[in-house]
Amino acid sequence: MLEKNEITRGKITGKSEIIDYWINIRQELIIDYSKIAGLTDNNKNCLPTDEKLNRFCETLVDYISAVHFRIYNMVKKHWDSTGFLTTDEINALYFGILETTDPLLTFSEKYSPSTIDSVNFTKFDQNISRVGEIMALRFEKEDILMNLILHSLTTQPNIPVT
C-alpha cells in the first residue's frame, strides 16, 4: 500500500492542495497500519501494543472523517463555484468508497480503546488482514477519484453566455 501511495504521490502531488492533503493523511494511515499489522521489520510475528493499536484506530477514524467531511466538502464547494456537475463515474466511485467505511469503522469500534486479550486475540490477525484488503480496495477507488477530482479542479467555471 505504501508503495502504491508513493506512486500516486509522485504522479499528482503539487497539483492541488486538497489532493496533497489527502495523500499525506493516507500515508500516515498506511504507516500506522503497517506498524500494527506486523509489516515492519520490528513488528513481524508480534501483536501490536495497545498504544499502537489505539493510535491506528484513531488515525483510521480521522482519515475516514477527513475524506468524507473535509476533503469532499472542499471539492463540492469548488464544484459549486464552477458549476461542475458530477459524472456517473465520480458518483459510482464515491459510493464504492462509502461501502468500505462501515467495515473499517467496525474494526475501530471493536479494537479501540482495547487491549488484545484472549477474547479478540484469535481473530485479530484475520481482522487486521481484512482491514488491509478493504483499505487497499478503498485506495484504488480513491486514486481514480483523485484523478477525476484533480481534472475537475482545473475545469474553468461555467459562465452562461448571454
Image (cartoon, rainbow, N blue to C red):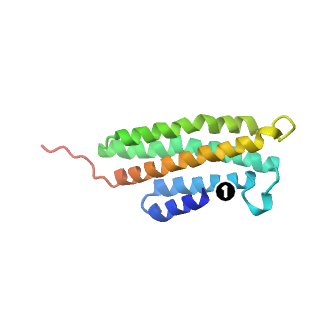
Q: Is residue 120 left or right of residue 133?
A: right
Q: Is residue 28 left or right of residue 161?
A: right
Q: Is residue 89 left or right of residue 3?
A: left
- Specify the amino acid type for callout 1: Ile
Q: Residue furthest left?
A: 162
Point 42% across, 61% down: residue: 15
Point 56% across, 57% down: residue: 24
Point 53% across, 56% down: residue: 23
Q: Is residue 114 visible?
A: no
The kind of secondary structure element at disc 1 is: helix
Nearer to the camera, 148 or 125? 125
Q: Residue furthest right?
A: 118
Q: Residues within 10 Å of mark 1 (few under 14, many from 20)?
A: some
User: How many numbered markers are drawn?
Assistant: 1
Residue that mark 1 sits on: 31
Q: Is residue 48 left or right of residue 71?
A: right
- Location of the C terminus by quadrant is top left
Point 58% across, 61% down: residue: 3
Residue 51 image offset from top left, x and y in percent:
79, 49
In this picture, is 45 found above or below 83?
A: below
